[in-house]
Image: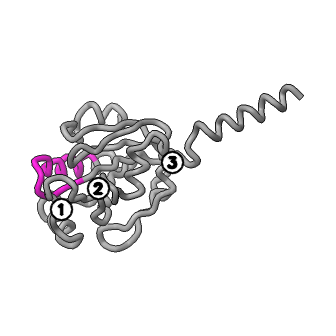
Amino acid sequence: MKQFILIATLSILTAFTLPADSSIHRFKVKSIDGSTIDFAAFKGKKILVVNTASECGYTAQYEDLQKLYEQFKGKLVIVGFPANNFGSQEPGSDTEIRAFCKARFGVTFPLASKISVKGSDMAPIYKWLTSKAENGVLDASISWNFNKFLLDENGKMLAYFPSKVKPMSDDILQYLR
């Protein structure tokens, strides 16, 4: 009986302290080309999620994001989320953003349709990424373009990196080697 009470108590406590689904794999988002990006398809790979903008001082990070994607393609997927939340630095349409990324940086990693990454209209995936209550690991505040979230092969949060951390930095590479 004591064992049953202990197990029941632990089950109840776990239910109240852990998010119901602390994996990014539950999300599906609209792709920049109108199809669907299903994060469940990335099971078994690390995922780097980045909010992007075409007219930002950090826009050149697209080049290193593409290099990172090519170098670790077998075990990493990068998903870019264009957002116009900071200084109106992503004013274009999905079609314009896609063309810019392809022509200027040769981007082949998945890009989502333009979303909001902060404020009252924040996309649900970014609510999950930025809330410890939802992702089970950390709280983060999107402070500018090119903030990065790294998730493990099971879709669990590993780390958050602000804009100034470059995609090919040791801060990120240490998780991929």
Mark 1–mark 2 contact, CB under 8 Å?
yes
Where the C terminus falls, by quadrant?
Answer: top left
In the depicted structure, whether residue 12 falls above or below residue 31? above
Q: How far, Cα to Cα, is label 2 from label 3?
A: 18 Å
Taking the spot 43% from the left edge, 49% from the top edge, the residue there is 128
Q: Above or below — where is 59 with respect to 98?
A: above
- Magenta stretch: includes residue 127: no
Stretch of the chain drawn in magenta: 52-68
Q: Which residue is mark 1?
A: 101
* Amino acid on which the number 1 mark rests in the picture: Cys
Dot 1 or dot 2: first in sequence order is: 2
Q: Residues within 10 Å of mark 2 (few under 14, many from 20)?
A: many
Residue at the image point whose x is 22% and y is 55% from the top: 85
Which label's residue is closer to the chain start, 3 or 1? 3
The image quadrant that residue 55 belongs to is bottom left
* Residue sticking out furthest to the front: 120
